[in-house]
Image (cartoon, rainbow, N blue to C red):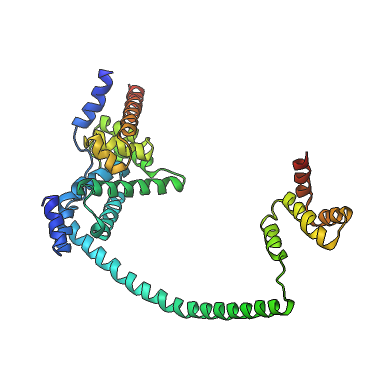
């Protein structure tokens, strides 16, 4: 179902049908976006469900001035950032710990290179992590990321460049330490 | 630079390393609708319960506010009628009360207003301030004076 079809269905009164279509179209994309932020499957499931519940509650207020796609990513990103900031408030970082346990995580099937990549990404500040993930993994244009994160394109480019260099450096350090 | 880019490029090209439990995405829509339905009901009855408790308390508070307001209005009216003229010092006192955190302005008030009315001399004012203000307030006044 396209975004236009979803919105038309919703406006015609078929609210649940539209919502199911929306979930079906976006569940995997949003799941992987959140998973790369929070790493753990159960935490991802919580954030994803919270995201869609918020979408259900706010869909009637969606004016269409932004694309449905960027609006959904914004909600999902904010939900992930809220989760990560709650972790920091509690004085720890479960994400950093989860990244350290990837080698024994049954839900992680990657090689050493991918483990070092996610360990490096886990060290980034939450918002910079979001910028990096959206650009690096999803190859989202800066214009779209700016709408998702409500930040200027210039700031995003600088943030991504900085994050890229840091991740590269941390990965190299880890790989060099092993050999 | 190229070698390091290769590391990140190789990692991205390796694909998706994360897995999900079997069948996770199937039925996600049904699970969500069930959760939405479950959350909708208790909230409505919660709102009704909260309003049922608050309503009599708010009504009581409104009654007291009305009675108090009426009483204050009557008292003010009788006080005004009894004295003839309304004292103009009320506004001046209110200003001094608002500026109580600034001892210098309080001193100005006493010197300009109260002192004139009650014919207080400087020594009486100083003794009054010495007993009413703390040492830190006095130190601040001294610092502001010089």
A179, B38: nearer the viewer: B38
Residue at 35% across, 36% down: A128
Give how far across and how far down residue A129 sits, in percent: 33, 37
Asked whether residue A154 is in view, the answer is yes
Q: Is residue A14 left or right of residue B72?
A: left
Q: Residue furthest front?
A: B84
Identify the image quadrant of the C terminus of chain A.
top left
In the image, residue B59 sits, relative to residue A138, either above or below, namely below
B79, B97: nearer the viewer: B79
Give how far across and how far down residue A127 sits, in percent: 35, 40
Asked whether residue A105 is in view, the answer is no
Residue at 13% across, 59% down: A9
Give how far across and how far down residue A64 sits, in percent: 21, 51
Q: Is residue A64 left or right of residue A95?
A: left
Residue at 73% across, 79% down: B82
Give how far across and how far down residue A97 sits, in percent: 38, 41
């Amino acid at each position: 179902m396209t975004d236009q079809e979803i919105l038309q269905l919703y406006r015609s009164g078929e609210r649940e049908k539209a919502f199911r279509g929306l979930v079906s179209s976006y569940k995997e994309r949003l799941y992987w976006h959140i998973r790369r932020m929070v790493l753990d499957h159960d935490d991802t499931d919580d954030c994803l469900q919270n995201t869609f519940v918020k979408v259900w509650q706010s869909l009637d207020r969606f004016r269409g001035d932004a694309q449905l796609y960027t609006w959904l990513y914004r909600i999902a990103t904010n939900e992930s950032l809220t989760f990560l900031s709650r972790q920091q408030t509690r004085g720890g970082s479960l994400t950093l710990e989860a990244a350290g346990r990837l080698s024994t995580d049954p839900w992680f099937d990657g090689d050493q290179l991918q483990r070092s990549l996610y360990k490096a990404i886990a060290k980034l500040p939450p918002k910079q992590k979001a910028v990096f993930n959206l650009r690096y993994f999803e190859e989202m244009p800066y214009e779209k990321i700016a709408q998702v994160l409500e930040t200027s394109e210039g700031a995003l480019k600088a943030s991504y460049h900085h994050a890229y260099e840091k991740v590269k450096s941390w990965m190299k350090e880890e790989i060099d330490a092993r050999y | 630079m190229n070698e390091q880019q290769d590391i990140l490029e190789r990692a991205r090209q390796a694909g998706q390393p994360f897995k999900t439990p079997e069948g996770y995405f199937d039925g996600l829509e049904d699970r969500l609708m069930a959760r939405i339905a479950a959350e909708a009901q208790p909230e409505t009855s919660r709102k009704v319960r909260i309003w049922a408790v608050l309503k009599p308390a708010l009504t009581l508070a409104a009654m007291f506010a009305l009675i108090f307001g009426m009483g204050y209005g009557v008292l003010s009216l009788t006080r005004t009628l009894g004295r003839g003229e309304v004292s103009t010092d009320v506004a001046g006192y209110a200003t001094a009360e608002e500026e109580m955190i600034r001892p210098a302005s309080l001193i100005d008030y006493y010197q300009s207003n109260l002192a004139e009315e009650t014919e207080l001399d400087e020594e009486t004012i100083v003794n009054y301030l010495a007993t009413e203000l703390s040492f830190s307030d006095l130190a601040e006044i001294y610092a502001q004076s010089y």
